[in-house]
Amino acid sequence: MRNGKLIVSGVIAIVVVVLFIFSSTTVQSGHRGVLLQLGAVKPTILTEGFHFRIPFIQSVEQVEVRVQKEESSQTAASKDLQMVTAKVAVNYSVDPGAVNKLYQQIGPDYRTRIVDPAIAESLKAVTAQYTAEELISKRPEVSAQVKEMLAKKLTKYYMILEDINIKEFAFSDEFNKAIELKQTAEQNALKAQRDLERIKIEAEQQVTQARAEAESLRLKKQEVTTELIQLKQIEVQEKALEKWDGHLPTVTGGATPFIDLSGAGKK
């Protein structure tokens, strides 16, 4: 009898342990638990930590709610029908308060069913509104529009868009060559324009200088008077006297007469 009681007690203990194991569950950090009862999704959402459930009737599926990163390379067409390949990095997370709806309506493979197609669709819709050159020069604007459109799509399926980054736009070799030729032509045109402006400025400076010299000459001519001429003649005679060697010429050549001193000192 005693041995029988021990056996029964052991069996009961094992059953209790098994029931405890199968009636408890632990939701990992950064996750939420979707409670299933006989395969049907219940409205209850289990937070992180330890929880009880009905063994063999209820089960728990864990859904990550931390920020997840999705990188992909997408091909689209620009407004001017240039093929462009964009590398896109998207950070998103599942709405913690709607993991049961996400699991029920989409399932655990929401990344391949929702996220990837939404990224491709948003990028193609936005790039079709810009030319290839605008995609390069207006990248922040393009990124903002893609983010807005993608956020709406993900919100519809109980996901939150955290951030998006368009790393680069890659175009065909023919387009890259055309851009390079255009930039070279623009640089040459700019250089020619600058040279023309420089030549124009130099010509204007020369004209201004010539006008200034002409005006100076005109003013000098206005200043030439009879008194000034006589004064200049006197200055010439004074310089001649300074160079006199003591021999007095009776007559000087040229237009300016020399003072005749041959009779000086004779009475």
Image (cartoon, helix red, strand yellow):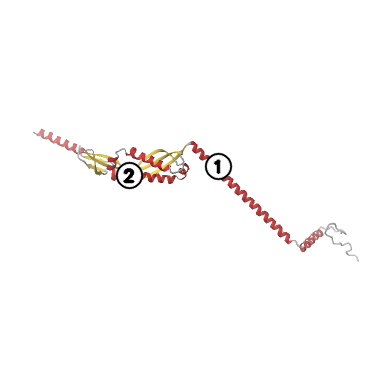
Q: Residues within 10 Å of mark 1 (few under 14, many from 20)?
A: few
Q: Are marks 1 and 2 in contact (CB under 8 Å)?
A: no
Question: Which of the labelled discs sits on residue 134, or is there none?
Answer: none
Find residue 201 and report its horizontal and vertical position in percent: 62, 51
Q: Is residue 136 left or right of residue 33?
A: right
Q: Quadrant of residue 164?
A: top left
In the picture of the structure, the residue carrying the numbered disc 2 is 156
Marks 1 and 2, Cα distance to the nearest angstrom?
48 Å
* Residue at (49% x, 38% y) in the render: 176
- Say which amino acid is labelled 1: Ala
Q: Is residue 202 above or below residue 111?
A: below
Q: Quadrant of the N terminus?
A: top left
Q: Quadrant of the C terminus?
A: bottom right
Q: Is residue 193 above or below residue 21?
A: below
Find residue 11 and report its horizontal and vertical position in percent: 15, 34
Q: Earlier in the sequence, mark 1 or mark 2?
A: 2
- Say which amino acid is labelled 2: Lys
Q: Quadrant of residue 45?
A: top left
- Secondary structure under tag 1 reads helix
* Residue at (73% x, 59% y) in the render: 221
Find residue 118 and report its horizontal and vertical position in percent: 36, 41
In the picture of the structure, the residue carrying the numbered disc 1 is 185
**Numbered label tally:** 2
Q: Is residue 37 above or below residue 220?
A: above
Q: Residues within 10 Å of mark 2 (few under 14, many from 20)?
A: few
- Secondary structure under tag 2 reads helix
